[in-house]
């Protein structure tokens, strides 16, 4: 896995940009944030980023139990009805990001990069692959071998999905939403949905792969560092 | 007049198409340069598309829910009519709106997020005379009633049943969802404009479980309705055929004194039906090969401690599953199925692994087994088997197998002749692994010798409609080579 990384990033590097120092990537760890507050915050920060009032920023946080629908969501992929959701204490949101239905909750590291994609990086697929690459790199630091699957955005290990992606790009190429990495997520909550609309496949977590308890915070630095590397940035 | 095009933008090198997910502006509304006018979605990304210039949104060419190639014109902006008359001169047929908002009104009716907002022009045929004309004239307008693409629009629309009107009043997205889930839009209460069924309406309808059984049936039916021209497929002459291959009636027998009668439980009933259908459909043939487990045993002994430290137990079944998944990649026909007149070669290797529930049988599925490590397969099989026995598998975890492994050998059976699960081409049966006295050649001297080796008989049940005898033999031989020369780094 580590063998392919330099080649990949070399191929993706914008030509003639070597040596030009880029502004660093700012990281903000927010702890647990209710989903609605997260949406409002992102909306505000997207505006601030577009206006140049803020540098590129990675928000790292956790959400309380919530099921969110993306633009491509099939409502039938929410398996838990209103009563069961109430019993589980799970809210339901339309999120404004791309992708299908997903679940967020305690033990899951959620990352919202608020970036103004620069000229050479204005490619949605490339951005998704960068996010996946960063998570794959971060997982490698834990000794977990993860990878991509053609046509199925997300990060996979051993046939199970360990991280989900769903992105929004606002006017002016400003990104929001992003990724959700299962660190010590209670995976039984995924039974309430068809994860990302793919029937018959399972989800996993870092904790499950490692067979030991992993605090969510433990994944924050590797993820932030890996994303900065993929974006060819320093961490602020 | 200055009318500029808004094309579906190229949002990435490998992106060839995009779906219009939401119009943020209506025809006739003023737009400012760089102000978002619509949202598109591709893959896992939703993106806002800004207006390329100041002006009025003169026409919408691509409706919500439609997917078009990059470069397709999705809208026109009239750059001179800014704040002028809502009905821009020479606007295309799609821009004929029912009460197009004037400049003042449009300021107030800023688009609200959510599916309940008012529809865009061209999506409401059948509501007013102008709307009908729009639908009739614009052959590509997606909102039009399917069967009425002729000149006789007004009358036909007036006479059309509520179903037609409902269908015409819902967005393509809603109709697609309805078609995919076999929902009759007639039955869905619409809260949108003029009783239109919104995305939220259909969401809550599906959620409320009102379609429970019929949707399941519809999902199993061939998915022809995806384009949603007419969500209900017409009955065909092949119904008898379908009945024979799809339904099972078990004959009844007289009950005698001393007999006990109890109804089949759910697993028994499903298994009984499945087996009968599977036998009716596939042309079953079985081949058997003997496999030496010396190499597997060696790898197992060498790694046992290391695996135990990671909490993993790697069973013989895990070795066989891991090897079979890799060999299957070389034999796509064994990871395929006949479907109608086609052969469907499965893109993923999803191994069904039969688990004895005593009583009963369940086959959890190991997705993408060909991408897993040996230890990964071991952990996953142990997990699936454990959760199968404690009845904790989710429905998703027992669907989508492309090849199956069953283990009659676990209880000492030498060889089994298993039934091929329907929708697949083959099943592997692993017989008991026993120590046997065998004649071998001494690897050094080449002399014949008698040795004690762990060996097992493996049977492959395959569908002769798709797989020929020689191919099954090659598969078994390759599997034998793989297991007898098991890679140390698996």
Image (tube, rainbow, N blue to C red):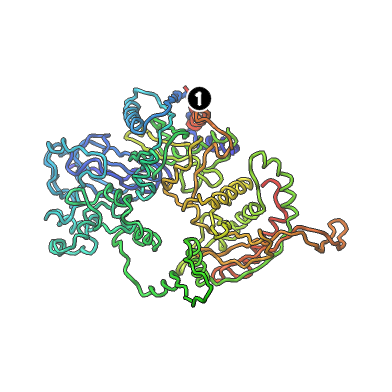
Residue A232, image x, y percentages: 49, 29
Q: Residues within 10 Å of mark 1 (few under 14, many from 20)?
A: few
A189, A220: nearer the viewer: A189
Chain of the residue where label 1 is placed in the rendered structure: A
Residue that mark 1 sits on: A19
Q: Tell me how many marks there are.
A: 1
On screen, B99 above or below A108? below
Residue B346, image x, y percentages: 51, 58
On screen, A5 above or below B95? above
Which quarter of the rendered picture does the N terminus of chain B lie within?
A: top left
Q: Secondary structure at mark 1?
A: loop
On screen, A147 above or below B135? above
Instruction: Report the side of A208 relative to A86 (left or right).
Output: right
B57, B436: nearer the viewer: B436
Residue B201, image x, y percentages: 26, 49
Residue B253, image x, y percentages: 49, 77
B181, B53: nearer the viewer: B181
Instruction: Report the side of B56 relative to B386 (left or right).
Output: left
Instruction: Report the side of A173 relative to A228 (left or right).
Output: left
In the picture, residue B213 is in which quadrant? bottom left
Q: Tell me which residue sits at (43%, 27%) in the image.
A: A31
Q: Tell me which residue sits at (57%, 64%) in the image.
A: B426
């Amino acid at each position: 896995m580590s063998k392919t990384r330099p080649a990949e990033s070399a191929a993706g590097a914008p030509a003639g940009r070597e040596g030009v120092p880029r502004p660093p990537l700012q990281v903000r760890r927010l702890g647990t944030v209710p989903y609605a507050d997260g949406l409002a915050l992102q909306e505000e920060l997207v505006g601030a980023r577009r206006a140049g009032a803020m540098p590129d920023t990675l928000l790292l946080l956790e959400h309380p139990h919530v099921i969110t629908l993306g633009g491509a969501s099939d409502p039938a992929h929410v398996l838990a009805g209103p009563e069961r959701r109430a019993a589980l204490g799970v809210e339901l949101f339309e999120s404004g990001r791309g992708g299908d239905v997903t679940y967020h909750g305690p033990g899951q590291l959620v990352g919202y990069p608020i970036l103004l994609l620069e000229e050479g990086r204005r490619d949605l697929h490339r951005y998704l692959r960068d996010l996946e690459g960063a998570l794959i790199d971060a997982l490698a630091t834990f000794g977990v071998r993860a990878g991509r699957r053609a046509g199925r955005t997300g990060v996979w290990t051993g046939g199970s999905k360990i991280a989900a992606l769903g992105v929004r790009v606002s006017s002016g190429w400003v990104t929001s939403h992003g990724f959700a990495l299962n660190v010590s997520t209670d995976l039984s909550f995924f039974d309430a949905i068809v994860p990302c609309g793919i029937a018959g496949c399972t989800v996993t977590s870092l904790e499950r792969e490692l067979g030991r308890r992993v605090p969510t915070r433990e994944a924050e630095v590797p993820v932030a560092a890996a994303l900065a590397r993929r974006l060819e940035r320093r961490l602020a | 007049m200055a009318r500029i095009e808004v094309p579906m933008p190229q949002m990435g090198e490998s992106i060839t198409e995009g779906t219009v997910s939401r119009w943020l502006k209506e025809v006739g509304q003023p737009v400012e340069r760089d102000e978002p006018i619509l949202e598109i979605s591709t893959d896992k990304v939703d993106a806002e598309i800004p207006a390329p210039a100041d002006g009025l949104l003169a026409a919408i060419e691509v409706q919500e829910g439609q997917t078009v190639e990059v470069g397709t014109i999705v809208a026109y902006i009239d750059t001179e009519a800014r704040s002028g008359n809502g009905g821009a001169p020479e606007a295309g047929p799609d821009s004929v709106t029912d009460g197009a908002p004037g400049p003042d009104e449009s300021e107030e009716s800023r688009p609200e997020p959510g599916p309940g907002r008012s529809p865009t022009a061209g999506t409401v045929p059948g509501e007013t005379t102008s709307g009908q004309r729009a639908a009739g004239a614009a052959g590509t307008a997606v909102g039009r009633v399917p069967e009425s693409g002729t000149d006789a629009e007004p009358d036909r629309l007036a006479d059309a049943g509520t179903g037609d009107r409902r269908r015409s009043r819902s967005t393509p997205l809603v109709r697609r969802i309805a078609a995919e889930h076999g929902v009759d839009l007639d039955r869905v209460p619409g809260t949108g404009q003029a009783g239109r069924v919104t995305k939220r309406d259909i969401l809550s309808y599906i959620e409320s479980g009102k379609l429970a059984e019929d949707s399941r049936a519809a999902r199993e039916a061939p998915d022809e309705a995806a384009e949603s021209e007419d969500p209900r497929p017409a009955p065909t002459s092949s119904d008898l055929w379908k009945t024979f291959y799809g339904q099972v009636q078990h004959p009844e027998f007289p009950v005698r004194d001393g007999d006990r009668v109890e109804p089949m439980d759910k697993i028994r009933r499903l298994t009984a039906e499945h087996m009968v259908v599977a036998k009716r459909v596939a042309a079953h043939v079985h081949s058997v090969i003997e496999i030496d487990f010396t190499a597997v045993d060696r790898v197992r002994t060498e790694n046992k401690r290391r695996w135990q430290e990671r909490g993993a137990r790697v069973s013989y079944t895990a070795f066989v599953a891991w090897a079979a998944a890799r060999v299957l990649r070389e034999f796509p026909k064994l990871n395929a199925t006949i479907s109608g007149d086609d052969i469907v070669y499965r893109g993923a290797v999803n191994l069904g692994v039969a688990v004895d529930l005593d009583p009963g049988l369940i086959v959890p599925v190991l997705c993408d087994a060909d991408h897993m490590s040996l230890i990964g397969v071991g952990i996953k099989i142990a997990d699936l088997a454990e959760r199968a026995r404690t009845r904790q598998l989710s429905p998703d975890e027992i669907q989508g197998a492309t090849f199956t492994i069953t283990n009659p050998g676990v209880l000492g059976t030498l060889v089994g002749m298993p039934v091929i699960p329907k929708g697949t081409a083959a099943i592997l049966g692993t017989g008991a692994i026993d120590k046997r006295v065998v004649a071998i050649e001494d690897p050094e001297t080449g002399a014949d010798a008698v040795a004690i080796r762990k060996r097992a008989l493996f049977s492959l049940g395959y569908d002769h409609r798709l797989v020929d005898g020689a191919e099954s033999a090659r598969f078994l031989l390759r599997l034998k080579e793989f297991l007898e020369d098991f890679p140390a780094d698996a």
